[in-house]
Amino acid sequence: MTPAPNVNDGSHAIRVALIDDEPLIRAGLRTILENDPRIRVVLEHGDGLGIVPAVRKAQCDVVLMDVRMPGRSGLDAIADLRAAGVPARLVVLTTFADTEYLRRAVEVSVDGYVTKASAPEDLVNAVHTVQAGGAALSPVVARWLLENAAGPMTRQADAHELVSRLTPRQHEVLLGIARGEDNARIASSLYLSEATVKGYVSEVLQRLGVERRVQAAVLAHQAGLL
């Protein structure tokens, strides 16, 4: 494990972990992220082993996780974090937008899936989006969701049935989730308070039987809402 330099010392900055086996990639990502004074990289780690205690010790808000790493894959490491109840937002950051990786990412309840081909500002925005409660998806990942109506979670007919259980307002909130919007943006578009939207999001996840916004977004796409 490599201690991350504390470039920013703002007490309210988003605390980010970079988990990637390539030191040069971590250095580049750190430079991109810490150009934003609201973000601090507080942890760097080079493989999928020992992630749970490391993330807990660093008190990370957001974890950016590569997929292919020695020792233990990033998706298995995310599953470990979920099983341990670590509250950090978990984002896959990888070169690969492979169908099997995407299916597995949904299964382990990621908060976002961003490719390394993304523009620097998109990576920064992804960190802010997931920290604010949104779902961060690269365009290539969003296209995959649209093109895989049979999807990893359920059949399209079942997705329609689940979505039909929502009230009109919950349906509107689900549309915002499917577009990757955070609570503040949904609140603005629906003229609601963020607290009210947060309540609606919880209701939507419960009615759909999912734990994370990305899973809800998958169901919305499967049901043909977008």
Image (cartoon, grey):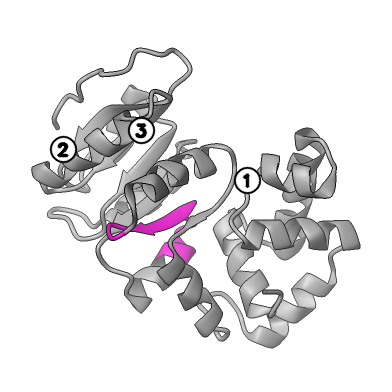
Task: Identify the disc placed on residue 16.
Answer: 3
Check disc 3 and give the amino acid type: Val
Residue 173: x %, y % from top left = 76, 55
Rendered image quadrant of residue 225: bottom right
* Relative depth, front residue between 38 and 82: 38
Residue 189: x %, y % from top left = 77, 49
Residue 61: x %, y % from top left = 44, 32
Secondary structure of residue under mark 2: helix
| Residue 40 versus residue 85 in the image, above or below | above
Residue 11: x %, y % from top left = 44, 12
Q: Neighbour class for label 3 at 10 Å: few (<14), some, many (≥20)?
A: many
Range of residues picked out in magenta = 105-117
Rendered image quadrant of residue 205: bottom right
Between discs 1 and 2, the one toward the N terminus: 2
Secondary structure of residue under mark 3: strand
Q: Which residue is mark 1?
A: 182
Seen at 73% across and 60% down, the residue is 174
Q: Neighbour class for label 1 at 10 Å: few (<14), some, many (≥20)?
A: many
Seen at 48% across and 75% down, the residue is 143
Check disc 2 and give the amino acid type: Ala
**From mark 1 to mark 3, how far is it between C-alphas?**
18 Å
Task: Identify the disc placed on residue 122.
Answer: none
